[in-house]
């Protein structure tokens, strides 16, 4: 073989973009890079479809970021929300228009990956990425990243997108810094038809007993997804909250088909989103709404941006150009999702101190319910709401100034 042919072969073996992880962030990144005509490889450690601990709540911004022609596999459409405060002061709010939809994650994620494949991305499942190298003997030149798989195989790429979730190895390589880690516990509870009918079209949100915690019931036909989330480090109390919550709802008699837990993470404001030719997105980057811990729209939106900017990094001829494109990615993320996260952080801080006030506002104050509806339906985002409604800003500032609720008994009843 001539040396010209051999170097052409080497060139073909270098992918333009390698995406690590085939969740919503990875599938979204792979789709964006593949529709731009690039050679894209997705590496996923699980076999698909794989289970992911998640409520599967799809709000407007998630819907609006899906690839063209994607049909959401809704298991239910939510038109009513029952709010309670640690089991008390229960009140249901209804909406004629759908508030948000509910999916089973294995099904939803698989469809997203199939869309990326249809756009031209290749998928390898059952392969775990152990590390990436941007220098050293595994890297043939300065424009290439080596992605090392368990077992020692190395895959080469011009750009890498780390979308490997909340225990991200690529995030560790990039040096992602976190300032909030929570533990979510969830049960998938198959229920008889009469119970399922009672929940159809309605979710329950319960503001929990630990600061910043809450629980939910998300109906998916013959199964209810029941979960709670709270700051990591309170595992025993979080478990007790879930058990009490399930018991209170009269669901303790039904055997869960799945019982699982998963961490969610929020990045610190100054956390990096890239290193060299490697970008991170979704949970791997700590991109998540800190108050509700809504992460699917953050994964889809940051994934799309990461795919688009990875294409430009793949084309960069030197480290300076690659760095410029990586900084553009970080700028795009911070200008949109970063603003939403900073409002969410403030909301969480106030909610942790005054859950009763939040409960009273959502159940008894029409503009608060309207804002909730607008956000879930996709008419606005937390960031836009604060920018365009000075009253919302003033309300948040006023809540911020009020002292914490002294005792559970003093919680305001709507
Ligand atoms: C209890 C709970 C409930 C939630 N409910 C909601 C909700 O209702 N709505 C909402 O919007 N968000 C919710 N979230 C958040 C949401 O689940 C996440 O933000 C979202 O899944 C992030 O997507 P992702 O693609 O970044 O990561 P993931 O969905 O975690 O995907 C990461 C993928 O990477 C793969 N992977 C990991 N490591 C490697 C490796 N080394 N090599 C190769 N592959 C690897 C994994 O197998 C996985 O498939 C919830 C989270 C929790 C914990």
Image (tube, rainbow, N blue to C red):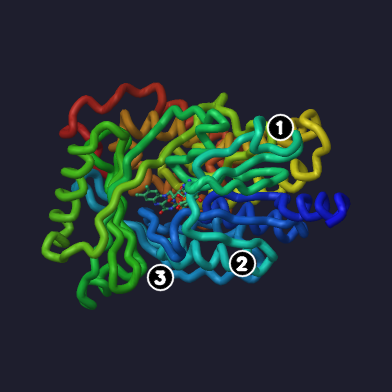
Where is residue 182? Give x, y as percent. 35, 37
Where is residue 173? Give x, y as percent. 55, 32
Residue nearer the viewer, 382 or 2: 2
Q: Quadrant of residue 101?
A: bottom left
Judge whether 291 appears above or below 153 on screen: above
Where is residue 137? Give x, y as percent. 66, 33
Could you tell which of marks 3 and 2 lies nearer the N-terminus? 3
Mark closer to the observer (3, 2): 2
Quadrant occupied by the C terminus: top left
Q: Quadrant of residue 93?
A: bottom left
Q: Residue at x 63, y 56 (%)?
A: 41
Q: Residue at x 38, y 60 (%)?
A: 51
Label 1: state its secondary structure: helix
* Image position of 358 (left or right of 396): left
Q: Tell me the residue that label 2 is attached to.
A: 115
Residue nearer the viewer, 30 or 74: 30
Mark closer to the observer (3, 1): 1
Disc 3 crowd rating (10 Å Cα; few below 14, some 14-19, many 20+) is some
Residue nearer the viewer, 227 or 32: 32
Judge whether 260 appears above or below 388 on screen: below
Label 2: state its secondary structure: helix
Q: Is residue 393 visible?
A: no
Report the Cα–Cα distance between label 1 and label 2. Answer: 28 Å
Could you tell which of marks 3 and 1 lies nearer the N-terminus? 3
Disc 1 crowd rating (10 Å Cα; few below 14, some 14-19, many 20+) is some
Where is residue 181? Give x, y as percent. 38, 34
Q: Tell me the residue that label 1 is attached to.
A: 327
Quadrant occupied by the N terminus: bottom right
Q: Tell me the residue that label 3 is attached to.
A: 75
């Amino acid at each position: 073989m001539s040396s010209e042919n051999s170097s052409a072969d080497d060139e073909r073996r270098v992918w333009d973009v390698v995406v690590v992880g085939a969740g919503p962030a990875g599938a979204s990144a792979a789709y964006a890079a593949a529709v731009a005509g690039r050679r894209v490889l997705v590496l996923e450690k699980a076999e698909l479809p794989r289970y992911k601990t998640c409520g599967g709540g799809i709000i407007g911004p998630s819907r609006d970021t899906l690839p063209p022609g994607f049909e959401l596999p809704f298991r239910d459409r939510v038109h009513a929300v029952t709010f309670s405060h640690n089991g008390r002061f229960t009140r249901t709010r209804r909406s004629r228009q759908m508030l948000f939809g509910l999916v089973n994650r294995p099904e939803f994620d698989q469809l997203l990956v199939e869309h990326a494949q249809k756009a031209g991305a290749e998928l390898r499942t059952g392969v775990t990425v152990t590390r990436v190298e941007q220098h050293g003997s595994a890297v043939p030149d300065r424009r290439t990243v080596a992605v090392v798989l368990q077992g020692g195989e190395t895959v080469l790429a011009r750009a890498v997108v780390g979308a490997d979730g909340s225990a991200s190895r690529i995030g560790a390589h990039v040096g992602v810094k976190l300032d909030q880690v929570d533990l979510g516990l969830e049960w998938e509870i198959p229920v008889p038809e009469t119970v399922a009918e009672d929940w159809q079209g309605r979710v329950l949100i319960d503001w929990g007993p630990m600061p910043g915690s809450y629980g939910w019931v998300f109906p998916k036909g013959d199964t209810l997804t029941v979960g709670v989330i709270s700051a990591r480090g309170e595992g025993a109390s979080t478990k007790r909250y879930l058990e009490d919550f399930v018991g209170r709802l009269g669901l303790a008699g039904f055997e869960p088909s799945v019982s699982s837990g998963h961490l969610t993470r929020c990045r610190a404001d100054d956390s990096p989103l890239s290193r060299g030719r490697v970008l991170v997105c979704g949970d791997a980057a700590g991109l998540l709404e800190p108050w509700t811990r809504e992460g699917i729209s953050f994964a889809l939106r940051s994934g799309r941006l990461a795919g688009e900017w990875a294409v430009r990094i793949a084309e960069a001829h030197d480290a300076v150009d690659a760095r410029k494109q990586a900084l553009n990615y970080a700028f795009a993320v911070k200008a949109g999702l970063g603003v939403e996260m900073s409002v969410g952080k403030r909301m969480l801080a106030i909610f942790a101190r005054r859950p009763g006030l939040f409960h009273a506002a959502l159940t008894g104050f029409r503009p608060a319910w309207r804002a909730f509806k607008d956000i879930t339906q996709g008419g606005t985002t937390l960031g836009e709401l604060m920018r365009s409604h000075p009253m919302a800003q003033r309300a948040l500032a006023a809540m911020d100034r009020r002292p914490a609720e002294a005792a559970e008994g003093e919680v305001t009843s709507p």
